[in-house]
Amino acid sequence: MPDSPDSKLNQLLRRLPDWIRRDLASTDASRRTRAEDSLHAMLMPLIADERAAGKDAG
C-alpha cells in the first residue's frame, strides 16, 4: 500500500536532510527549534492530506 499514511510518513522521514537530523539532537536550543520548525512544516501537508482524505471518505 504505497499511499498509506505510514508509507508517506516513512518516505518523509527517509528524505529528511542531514542537518535536520543533527539539529534535532543538538544541545543548542536554537538549532533544535529550527529543526523542529522545519520538521513541523514538512509534516503539516501530510496531515492536511490525511484530514482531507478522511472527509472525502466520510
Image (cartoon, rainbow, N blue to C red):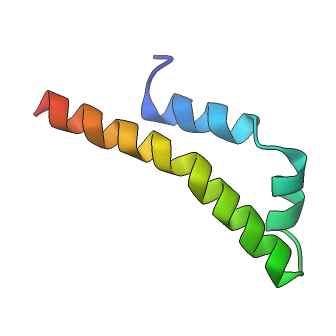
Q: Residue 34 lies in what quarter of the image? A: bottom right
Q: Residue at x 54, y 49 (%)?
A: 43
Q: Residue furthest top?
A: 1
Is 13 placed left or right of 54 in the picture?
right
**x, y percent for residue 42:** 60, 47
Q: Residue at x 16, y 29 (%)?
A: 57
Q: Residue at x 89, y 54 (%)?
A: 19
Q: Quadrant of the C terminus?
A: top left
Q: Residue 37 lies in what quarter of the image? A: bottom right
Q: Residue at x 88, y 73 (%)?
A: 26
Give the camera-side residue of 45 and 6.
Answer: 45
**x, y percent for residue 4:** 43, 27
**x, y percent for residue 8:** 54, 31
Q: Quadrant of the N terminus?
A: top left
**x, y percent for residue 36:** 68, 65
Is 5 placed left or right of 36 in the picture?
left
Is 34 placed left or right of 51 in the picture?
right
Give the camera-side residue of 34 and 11.
Answer: 34
Instruction: Classify 27 as above or below 2.
Output: below
Instruction: Classify 43 as above or below 34.
Output: above
Q: Residue furthest left?
A: 58
Q: Residue 54 lies in what quarter of the image? A: top left
